[in-house]
Image (tube, rainbow, N blue to C red):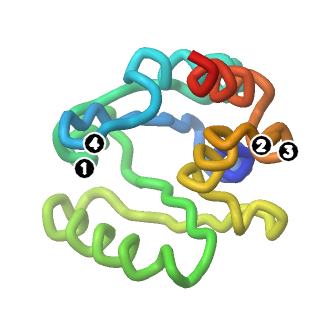
Amino acid sequence: MTNGHLDVVERARKLFDEVIVAVADNDEKQPLFSLEERLNLLRATVGKADNVRIAHFDGLLVEFAMENQARAVIRGLRAVSDFEFEFQMALMNRKLESGVETIFLMPKEEYSYLSSRIIKEIARLGGNVSNFVPPVVAKALAGKFTE
């Protein structure tokens, strides 16, 4: 969870009665944090906000959306480089379930360069990430790389 993610969630909260921040449980990826750790970090950051619910899913995002009566999926776009992949995913999701729309939101310009991958690399090399992530995430990252 970067400050850019937080910004997108805040923007979405202004548009929807409820925002579900959903974490994918994907066995093929090797995330730095376990599913439970990621959920706990989300609960500690955006989970306390009104009209935000934290959830996890495995399988297709559009199926999760339909099961939760969500009619839109919010995706953050930082730069043009994000657009091609996100556009393809949005079209595929529409083909799979036409009742779920994809809405793209851009974070504030000051967050447009942030990426989880780069932040993890900075933390791994001992750099200070406190300007890029919430304090609880910075602490968790530091803990991962000093173990």
Instruction: Give the camera-side residue of 14 and 116.
Output: 116
- Write the residue at 60% across / 27% down: 145
How much space separates mark 4 and mark 2, taking CA atoms? 25 Å
Q: Position of residue 46 (x, y in %)?
A: 67, 29
Amino acid at dot 4 = Lys
- Residue beneath label 2, please? 127
Q: Are marks 3 and 2 in contact (CB under 8 Å)?
A: no
How dense is the environment of label 1, judged by Cα within 10 Å: few (below 14), some, or many (20 and up)? many
Which mark sits nearer the N-terminus, 3 or 1? 1
Tell me, yes or no, if residue 92 can be seen here: yes
Front position among marks 3 and 2: 2
CA–CA distance between discs 3 and 2? 11 Å
Tag in front: 1 or 4 = 4
Q: Are marks 1 and 2 in contact (CB under 8 Å)?
A: no
Quarter residue 134 falls in: top right
| Tag 4 residue | 29
Above or below residue 68? Residue 78 is below
Could you give the CA–CA distance between mark 3 and mark 1, rounded to whole angstroms?
A: 33 Å
Q: Label 3: which residue?
A: 131
Which residue is under mark 1? Answer: 62
Q: Is residue 16 above or below residue 27?
A: below
Q: Nearer the viewer, mark 3 or mark 1?
A: 3
Amino acid found under the numbered disc labelled 1: Val
Residue sitting nearer the eye, 27 or 57: 27
Q: Tell me the SS state at disc 4.
A: loop
Q: CA distance from mark 1 to mark 2?
A: 37 Å
Labelled pair 4, 3 in contact (Cβ < 8 Å)? no
Instruction: Give the quarter of the figure containing the N terminus.
Output: top right
Q: Is residue 135 left or right of residue 22?
A: right
CA neighbours of label 4 inside 10 A, class few (<14), some (14 to 19), many (20+) = few
Residue 102 coordinates in the image, percent (x, y): 41, 64
